[in-house]
Amino acid sequence: MATAISKWIVDPKRNPLAAYHRKTLSGRLSKYGLRYDDLYDPMYELDVKEAMNRLPREIVDARNQRLKRAMDLSMKHQYLPEDLQRVQTPFRSYLQEMLAFVKREQAEREALGALPLYQCTFP
């Protein structure tokens, strides 16, 4: 019962509030030319860092360029021009598949009793 309700809450096809949130988030990301996957911080979660290391160099370079452009626009208190905002694809994923693969690998290592590849330590 609880899982059905939680699935309904986050599904933008069935919940109008989730659809509104997705539309708002899409607009905000498009203003700066970002994608949703750009918001993941590899310094905070080590699985994201490992997934980023496994991605092709061109994808990582494109991500870094989008982040630099977004920071530059934010510092200048500007947005992308309207014609560039319309061609942005904020929910086109490039990291989710690799991140899921890394998490499955990590779960498999734990199930087999192997040592983790990395330890999460924060100062």
Image (spheres, rainbow, N blue to C red):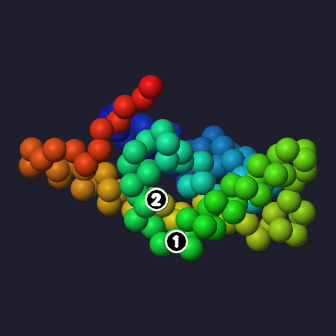
Q: Residue furthest top?
A: 123
Residue 48, position in %: x, y? 44, 50
Residue 67, position in %: x, y? 69, 55
The residue lying toward the viewer, choosing from 45 and 24, is 45
Residue visible at 43% across and 61% down in the picture = 53
Q: Which mark is residue 57?
A: 1
In the structure shown, which secondary structural element does the residue marked by tag 1 occupy?
helix
| First-in-chain label (2 vs 1) | 2
Tell me where residue 54 sits by quadrant. Answer: bottom left
Spatial CA span between label 2 and label 1:
9 Å
Residue 102, position in %: x, y? 32, 56
Residue visible at 51% across and 65% down in the picture = 94
- Quick check: can you spot residue 11? yes
* Above/below status of 86 relative to 70: below
Please give the residue where the numbered disc 2 appears in the rendered image: 52
Task: Report the amino acid beneath label 1.
Answer: Arg
Q: Quadrant of the N terminus?
A: top left
Task: Report the amino acid beneath label 2.
Answer: Met
* Above/below status of 81 relative to 38: below
